[in-house]
Amino acid sequence: MSASTTPAAPQVVAAAVIGAGTMGAGIAQVLAQSGIRTVLFDVSQEAVDAGLERIEKMLQKGVERGKLNADVRQQALECISMQLDLAAAVDGCQLVIEAAPEKLELKQSLFAQIGAVVDDNCIIASNASSLSVSTLAESCPHPERFIGLHFFNPPPIMKLLEIVRGAQTSDAIVEQCRILASDWGKEPIVVRDAPGFASSRLGLAIGLEAMRMVDEGVASPTDIDKAMKLGYGFPMGPLELTDMIGLDVRLDIARHLAEELNADRFATPKGLRERVENGNLGRKSGKGYYRWKDGKRLD
């Protein structure tokens, strides 16, 4: 079936999110807040429990800040269920979004399993931030229904949703995802499947240069971030953002883009490598380019 003749997906009333980490939990919250029955899957009870706890905390913060009312919070929680069995998690879903770690072999294995059991009209999406959507789609029997849906951290707050069209993704699926993004309160952009897409490629280039400036003693992390916030209108500086994303995540993406694009501009700075080797991964470990406690910056 050609991309132009693929029938549109049905209305999404049930979805599954594969991976209950920071991104997976946040994506599940976005779907649940829009009224979609959402199953959150991971391989252990501890992981799904932690994911649900993240969602509960984010929703409660929304209530405390006046962004949500208590009824919306409760309705969202009622839309979420947890599952440790992958086939059961995706059963009857019109949309499955993978949010597993950025490892090609892991994602390929998941998509092979998902593609074997979902309905033929199910949209299968990846939250990959740098891996090729077209390559991931090869693991599925219906690559025309495969697409990249790249959310940003934290998904319930960040408005951007990067829709990545794979080599065989149908026009109908792209349009369906545009509509879904708007329904979720997101601002979608559509990009071709190219290394780093648009957002990761641009954002990482700036972030790596900021890291090199720290290594060279040009300025402190605080002043480098202040330069971008006050001089260019960035809501968050590139080094604080790196701490939020995770230094290990940025290191993996930089290595991937350096290889895919054969580009020195994505060479990994010494300070980044050393911090990761020492376990200083950013906010999640308590230290990166800044110090953190309970998710809040100390300096």
Image (cartoon, rainbow, N blue to C red):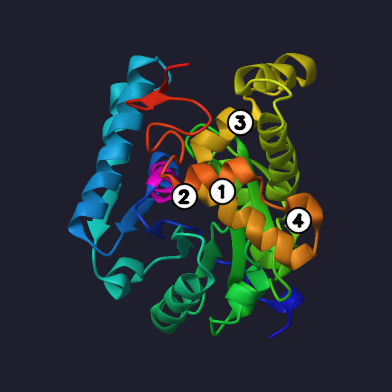
Name which residue type carries label 2: Glu
The span shown in magenta is 22-29
Residue tagged 1: 273
Residue tagged 4: 191
Q: Look at the image and tell me in which quarter the N terminus lies.
A: bottom right
Q: Are marks 3 and 2 in contact (CB under 8 Å)?
A: no
User: Is disc 3 surrounded by few (<14), some (14 to 19) or many (20+) residues within 10 Å?
Assistant: many
Residue 255 showing in the rendered view: yes
Report the disc number at residue 277. 2
**Circle nearer the N terminus (1, 3):** 3
**Circle nearer the N terminus (2, 4):** 4
Q: Nearer the viewer, residue 199 or 259?
A: 259
Magenta residue check for 53: no
Q: Is residue 295 above or below residue 212?
A: above
Q: Nearer the viewer, residue 287 or 40?
A: 287
Name which residue type carries label 1: Arg
Residue tagged 3: 239
Q: Secondary structure at mark 4?
A: strand
